[in-house]
Each structure stands twice: as structure tokens, then as C-alpha cells.
Amino acid sequence: MLKTSGFTLIELVVVISVMALLAVLVVSRGVTDYQAPIAAQKLASDIEYAQALAVSTATRCGVDFSVASNRYTVFSGTPATPVSDPVNGGNYTVQYGSGNYSEVTLSSVSFNATTTLYFDSRGRPLDSSGNLLTSDGTAVLNGPRTVTVTQDTGVVRVS
């Protein structure tokens, strides 16, 4: 009798196919896991940038959110005047659902029940009517990741 040991070609193909499928599942889950925390940290940094800009230029600046469009814009004066992005020179707008943030969604935003956050020349957070925030403001991304702006000080936290 001829005794052979080893694997057949079919067995090898099946094992490689299963490993490839598992790799795809791990990578696709991993994309969501790392994008939301990074997006939340960037949002927090952009809010702090708007606050610093308001203080340094003595102009009302802020961040305008659009949950329906899944994006936000950093602006000076009014939401209609976006500031220049210090990285690429274009309008300072971050679009979720594409590019580096393809798996990120802006779920909800509330700054005194409005979707626009202003800062005055002293760095205090205001709603779209120019009133000081009466409670902490939040922007929630999927994950869930919450970016909170403290009502009195404008300190930004990510949780």
C-alpha cells in the first residue's frame, strides 16, 4: 500500500478561503473601531480651534453642524463665512461618511437646542442666538462617541 501524508489542493484552498474571509471581517470591523475615536478627537480639536480663534481675533467664531448633511464647518463671524483650513487652505468643513471618516456618522447635536456653537471674544460658549449655554452642549458621533462643551468654561471633553 502506498501511504501519503499531507494536504490535498482542495483542503488548502478551503483553508486559505476561510482565512481570507476572517481577515476581511476583522479589517472591516477595525475600520469602524478606529475612525469614530479619531473623528471625535478631531472634532474636539476643531471646537478648541474655533474657541482660540474667537479669543485671538476678538470675533465671534464657532462650529456649525448639519446632522442631515453629516458634516460641520468652522467659521468666523457667521456660519456663512467658513475659516480657511490651516492644513489644505480650503473651507474648514469636515464631511463624515466619506474619505478618512467613511464609517463615521454625526448622530445628534445640541447647544441649547441649536446646532450652531459660537464662542465670544472671551472664549465663552454661546448658542446661535448669542446666549450663554444653559447646560453642557454635545455632539454625538456613532460608536457612540460624545464631544461635550462645558457650559461655563467651554472646556471640551470626549467620552
Image (cartoon, helix red, strand yellow):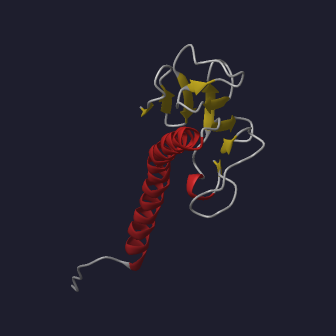
Report x, y in % for residue 148: 49, 28
Left or right side of 52 for 81: right
Position of 57 relative to 25 (above/below): above
Quadrant location, the N terminus: bottom left
Quadrant location, the C terminus: top left
Looking at the picture, tell me which residue is in the foreground, 17 or 134. Answer: 134
Left or right side of 19 for 133: right
Give me the residue at 42% from left, 54% from top. Answer: 26
Give me the residue at 55% from left, 26% from top. Answer: 138
Which residue lies most toward the top here? 134
Report x, y in % for residue 134: 56, 13
Looking at the picture, tell me which residue is in the foreground, 18 or 41. Answer: 41
Give me the residue at 24% from left, 82% from top. Answer: 4
Left or right side of 67 for 23: left
Q: Quadrant of residue 19?
A: bottom left
Position of 18 relative to 1 (above/below): above
Position of 27 relative to 56 (above/below): below
Q: Quadrant of residue 14?
A: bottom left
Report x, y in % for residue 153: 46, 24
Which residue lies most toward the front here? 58
Give me the residue at 55% from left, 31% from top. Answer: 140
Report x, y in % for residue 67: 69, 35
Position of 95 relative to 144 (above/below): below
Left or right side of 70 for 149: left
Looking at the picture, tell me which residue is in the foreground, 48 or 30. Answer: 48
Counting the numbered discs, the total is 0
Q: Quadrant of residue 37?
A: top left
